[in-house]
Amino acid sequence: MKPRHLGTVVLVLGLLLLAVGAYVLSGLPPRGQVRSLARLNPGSTGVMRERAEEARKAGRRPRREQVWVPLPRISRSLIEAVLVAEDIRFFGHDGIDWEALKESVERDLKEQRFARGGSTITQQLAKNLFFSTRKSPVRKLREAIVARWLEEDLSKRRILELYLNVIEWGDGIYGCEAAARHYFDESAADLDAQQAAGLAAMIPNPRRINPARDAALYSRAQKRILWLMARAGYVKQVVGGMGAEPPPVEDAE
């Protein structure tokens, strides 16, 4: 390739990268809005708005069950179950778990689709607060940027508190307190290991992995979380149930 042509190619690629970067940045929330979460609880989130719009399009009235609770009023069993299920290295990373991300990319390439996996609790919180459930490379880039902001501006405990209070646990059910009351008629503070494992098992797809919709699927997913909790030392092996290998991962898609 002639130098003049090479220079043109480099210029075009540079302009393309700038355009993509500008597009990614244009969809980010204001940094001040992220910082404010250190002291203020969010109102309606991106996923809540997405679900409300879906309900309206389907001719249904949007519903929202949510009761905010501080971290000390959330069962230790639920915190442990969510950590082993979603982000076992939560307290050791800076918002992105590069090892899990590598495994997720390899799985995506193998299956030729955006398979679930690799997102940390911080990334999931970023998605829930500011974006939607629709998967795309651009959303993942924006999610990663906001995750870094969250880690820089908030404590790990605050990130976990926000996460447990805003994530979806069924149709119109948001946060662990509403979920605990809806499924077990208990407060989030009083959940035992079995109940906590059940709620954590639902997180990948609460509309499908749901005791009311598919009790067998829910039970298998719950047993897997109990196995992981036992392996981490959070529950006794007899509670966790047992073999050398965990129950298979449920396809939540």
Image (cartoon, rainbow, N blue to C red):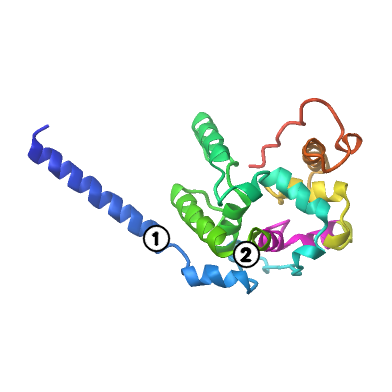
In the depicted view, which residue is nearer to us: 63 or 4? 4
Which amino acid does the dot numbered 2 rest on?
A: Met
- Distance of mark 2 from mark 1, alpha carbons? 22 Å
Q: Residue at x 56, y 57 (%)?
A: 127
Which residue range is magenta in the image? 160-183
Label 2 or label 1, whichever comes before in sequence order: 1
Residue 237 sits above or below residue 212 on the image: above
Which amino acid does the dot numbered 1 rest on?
A: Leu
Q: Residues within 10 Å of mark 1 (few under 14, many from 20)?
A: some
Secondary structure category for the residue under label 2: helix
Image coordinates for residue 177, horizontal then vertical, percent: 79, 63
Among the 4 quarters of the image, the one containing residue 44: bottom right
Q: Quadrant of the C terminus?
A: top right
Secondary structure category for the residue under label 1: helix
Q: Residue at x 61, y 58 (%)?
A: 125
Query: Is the residue under label 1 in contact with that under label 2 (CB below 8 Å)?
Result: no
The residue pinned by badge 1 equals 25
- Would you say residue 127 is visible in this rendering? yes
Q: Residue at x 55, y 61 (%)?
A: 150
Residue 241 marker: none
Q: Is residue 181 magenta?
A: yes
Q: Residue at x 81, y 46 (%)?
A: 197
Q: Is residue 43 magenta?
A: no
Image coordinates for residue 6, horizontal then vertical, percent: 14, 38
Image coordinates for residue 112, horizontal then vertical, percent: 50, 33
Mark 2 or 1, closer to the camera: 1
Residue 48 marker: 2
Among the 4 quarters of the image, the one containing residue 53: bottom right
Residue 213 shown left or right of residue 18 in the figure = right
In the depicted view, which residue is nearer to us: 243 or 91? 91
